[in-house]
Image: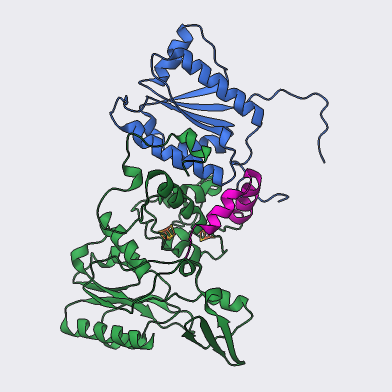
Chain colours: A green, B blue
């Protein structure tokens, strides 16, 4: 990872120095080793705080909506999963493609600090990853954890590969893995209606309507969102009415259906640990099963499943009969 | 503290039917003028095309206390606007499947294609759907989806 970081830094410096780009979007060091945050670097000096490590899970593609409209080119580092969001945003005409310089970077799965803490390891000062092991250093000594236990949920079943026609690529080959991202969805489907209702009610009742899931989502980038409530005086935070409060998650999941790339950012940022990806993946699974496999963001053109049809599509009343799914 | 009621009030469900202006709404008219009956608790909302039905309409109907929601449009291929109902078909297939995934009984949602000439079919569909929802009882799930029990 260190060598990748150095190469990235080198490229960022060269691009800024030559004036080819006006800014570079990457990650900058946080107060702790585990909280780097997305940042825009406009000069070589600013790059002192540049970082790329196992905690850089954030998807940078959404920042390009704003940045690509600025004067001068913007360079951006995209992980495999981010590249799908990028394509989707280009397809929806939200990003000015000609103003962006993409550098694809490797990702072997990012770590989830909350999962590390849940293992009883606190005060993390550094991590070292070797294959399937994570060596965590703390002032109280070292701990070795199993990597699959502490990667971000979105990384656990990720098999994504780079999808953008990159200007350049900094990455190692990553072997394809045998993972099933629909396993949890299938478990829920196998439950009774009562059990599913109980499950979702318990999950969704935890929501504090912070809107973080919406704000982070690359698919949720409408200029005017149904969940904005300017009349409240405290923008984007107040519920309009009971309807919105009750059905927020269903409405949001439907709005991104066919457009969600399954980047997993929503679940990553949810402070209440609500498995929002299980909502999106239900739509993805149904779309795959009813209308043919479709991966949003695989290309930056073409129609989405909800803006196309065939004459022989399944009838809504028949989707429960089983054979369609 | 459960209320003890000796007399059981008969349950009449609240049914919302979104009907396309060009077919099923006229079908309902025909049912009426042919003196065919359908239950009075079916509340028809006329829409210019089944495709006008935004999924939030369906959700709102449930949240406001509907016990069942049915959407009626022209038969596929016969849409007044040529392709509207094809989009409806995908949209509703996904929405209804999703609602069921959230635990909403699948019997509460339905899509039927009813033409302007099918007055008898309109009446039969509505009678059938009302009977189906009546058997299920009241819809509570989409009005308290986010309220934990006992709170
Ligand atoms: S809904 Fe979640 S997984 Fe889908 S694109 Fe948005 S943040 Fe990513
Ligand atoms: S991030 Fe989680 S808590 Fe915040 S609004 Fe979304 S679901 Fe609710």
Relative to A229, A207 lies left or right: right
Q: Position of residue A140 (x, y in %)?
A: 62, 92
Res. B64 in view: no
Q: Residue furthest top?
A: B34
Location of residue A264 by image quarter = bottom left
Quadrant holding the N terminus of chain A: bottom left
Between A102 and A170, the one lying in front of the other is A170
**B102 is higher (above) or lower (below) than A41:** above
Closer-to-camera residue (A269/A105): A105
Magenta stretch secondary structure, dominant: helix
Task: Name which residue lies at 60% across and 52% down.
Answer: A200
- The magenta stretch spans which residues? A179-205
Residue A221: image location, x then y, percent:
35, 56
Image quadrant in which you'd find residue A236: bottom left
Nearer to us in this view, B145 or A108: A108
Seen at 47% across and 52% down, the residue is A232
State left or right for residue A156 relative to residue A206. left
């Amino acid at each position: 990872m260190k060598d990748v970081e150095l190469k990235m830094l080198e490229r960022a410096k060269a691009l800024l120095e030559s004036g080819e780009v006006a800014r570079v979007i990457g990650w900058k060091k946080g107060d702790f080793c585990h909280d780097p945050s997305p940042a825009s670097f406009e000069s070589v000096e600013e790059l002192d705080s540049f970082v790329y490590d196992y905690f850089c899970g954030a998807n940078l593609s959404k920042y390009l909506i704003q940045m690509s409209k600025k004067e001068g080119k913007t360079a951006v580092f995209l992980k495999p999963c981010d590249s799908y969001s990028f394509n989707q945003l280009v397809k929806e005409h939200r990003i000015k493609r000609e103003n962006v310089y993409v550098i694809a970077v490797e990702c072997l799965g990012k770590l989830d600090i909350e999962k590390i803490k849940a293992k009883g390891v606190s005060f993390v000062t550094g991590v070292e990853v070797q294959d399937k092991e994570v060596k965590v250093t703390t002032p109280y000594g070292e701990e070795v954890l199993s990597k699959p236990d502490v990667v971000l949920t979105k990384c656990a079943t990720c098999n994504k590969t780079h999808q953008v026609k990159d200007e350049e690529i900094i990455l190692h080959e990553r072997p394809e893995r045998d993972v099933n991202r629909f396993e949890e969805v299938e478990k829920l489907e196998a439950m009774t209606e009562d059990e599913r209702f109980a499950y979702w009610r318990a999950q969704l009742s935890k929501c504090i309507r912070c809107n973080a899931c919406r704000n982070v989502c690359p698919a949720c980038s409408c200029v005017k969102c149904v969940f904005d409530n300017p009349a409240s005086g405290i923008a984007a935070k107040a519920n309009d009415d009971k309807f919105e409060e009750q059905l927020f998650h269903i409405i949001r999941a439907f709005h991104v259906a066919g457009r969600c790339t399954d980047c997993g950012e929503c679940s990553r940022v949810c402070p209440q640990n609500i498995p929002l990806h299980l909502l999106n993946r239900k739509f993805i699974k149904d779309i795959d099963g009813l209308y043919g496999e479709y991966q949003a963001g695989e290309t930056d053109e073409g129609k989405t499943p909800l803006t196309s049809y065939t004459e022989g599509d399944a009838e809504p009343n028949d989707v429960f009969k089983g054979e369609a799914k | 503290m459960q209320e003890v009621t000796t007399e059981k009030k008969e349950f009449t469900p609240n049914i919302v039917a979104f009907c396309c202006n060009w077919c099923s709404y006229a079908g309902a008219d025909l049912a009426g003028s042919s003196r065919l009956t359908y239950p009075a608790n079916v509340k028809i909302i006329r829409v210019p095309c089944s495709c006008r039905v935004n999924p939030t309409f369906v959700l709102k109907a449930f949240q406001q206390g509907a016990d069942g929601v049915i959407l009626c449009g022209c038969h596929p291929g016969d849409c007044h606007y040529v392709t509207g109902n094809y989009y409806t078909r995908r949209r509703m297939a996904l929405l209804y499947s999703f609602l069921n995934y959230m635990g909403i009984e699948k019997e509460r949602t339905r899509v039927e294609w009813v033409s302007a000439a099918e007055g008898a079919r309109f009446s039969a569909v509505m009678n059938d759907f009302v009977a189906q929802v009546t058997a299920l009882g009241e819809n509570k799930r989409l009005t308290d989806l986010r309220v934990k029990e006992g709170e």
